Amino acid sequence: MFDDFFIRALVAGIGVAIVTGPLGCFVIWRRLAYFGDTLSHSALLGVTLAFSFSINISLSVFFVSGIIALLLLSLQKRTKLPGDALLGLLAHSSIAVGLVLIGFLTFIRFDIMGLLFGDILSVTINDIFIIWCGGSLILIILYYIWSSLFAATVNYDLAAAEGMNPDRSNIIFTLLLAGVIAISIKMIGVLLITGLLLIPPALARNLSNNPTQMVFLSILGGVASVVLGLFSSLEFNTASGPTIIVVALVLFILSMLAPNLDSKLKK
């Protein structure tokens, strides 16, 4: 039987995959890939502040990522800079500030590789509790704003005309993204969390015919990536976080080949 650390990693990874699936679909639909990347980069600053002030890492990452998200929404209305320029500015500034602060904290030993690429095999029972409870809260909130958020994704003006308050849904959605990054950072790391947000929904889009089907296939793709990635990491003695993303990439490539194979079989 597998060691306890492997079971904990599986439970934590599956929990994260279930949460990132639905949120990742909206990231794909709304073309917010770079936005998710910006929030994940800002997580390093959150981790640094957590070590500096001895507070919970997930709480600190959520706080910093949330501020960055709200700051971006504010800057988009106040400046003439295009959105991608603002995203690049905030992403690289936040990760640079985080790395500079790490240099000043000489009295604390940092595992930089663990921060950047995650270390799912070191998750604790407390981490699992945060992932599942935090993830459940994120999914419940997403369920309640689903209609207005989906309507705003399809047609913002129509959603506003229907009184669905799309601006509020957008703000809540950005905070949910900050939340999923906060609970996932220990598993996948700062640089790779966007991969788990994007690749499973991308492969689901290749295989699905409607939004609901895409959400469920995205969750299945994420869970499969985590399970196969962890088993592969154990078998080949590779880093767990990057291996999960590589498996997700392989599944995405297979999803691209599936429609072609299906059409050939029909002929």
Image: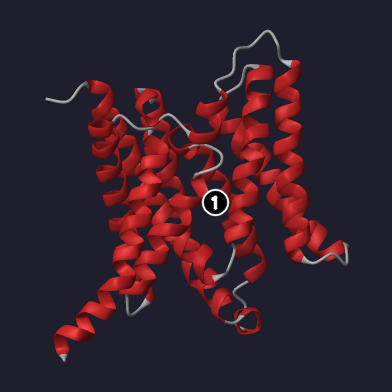
| Quadrant assignment for the C terminus | bottom left
Residue 165 x %, y %: 64, 71
What element does badge 1 sit on?
helix
Residue 167 shows in the view: yes
Residue 153 x %, y %: 56, 74
Q: Residue furthest right?
A: 79
Task: Tell me which corner region of the image, top left, top right, bottom left or bottom right, holds residue 218.
Answer: bottom left
Viewer-side residue, 142 vs 18: 18
Q: Residue furthest left?
A: 1
Which residue sits at x=58%, y=46%? Answer: 178
Residue 133 shows in the view: no
Which residue sits at x=26%, y=31%? Answer: 234
Give above or below for 26 relative to 115: below
Viewer-side residue, 105 vs 74: 105
Q: Is residue 68 left or right of residue 17?
A: right
Give above or below for 76 relative to 161: above
Give above or below for 267 relative to 238: below
Residue 192 x %, y %: 50, 44
Amino acid, disc 1 = Leu
Q: Which residue is mark 1?
A: 176
Which residue sits at x=17%, y=25%? Answer: 2
Q: Is residue 136 left or right of residue 38?
A: left
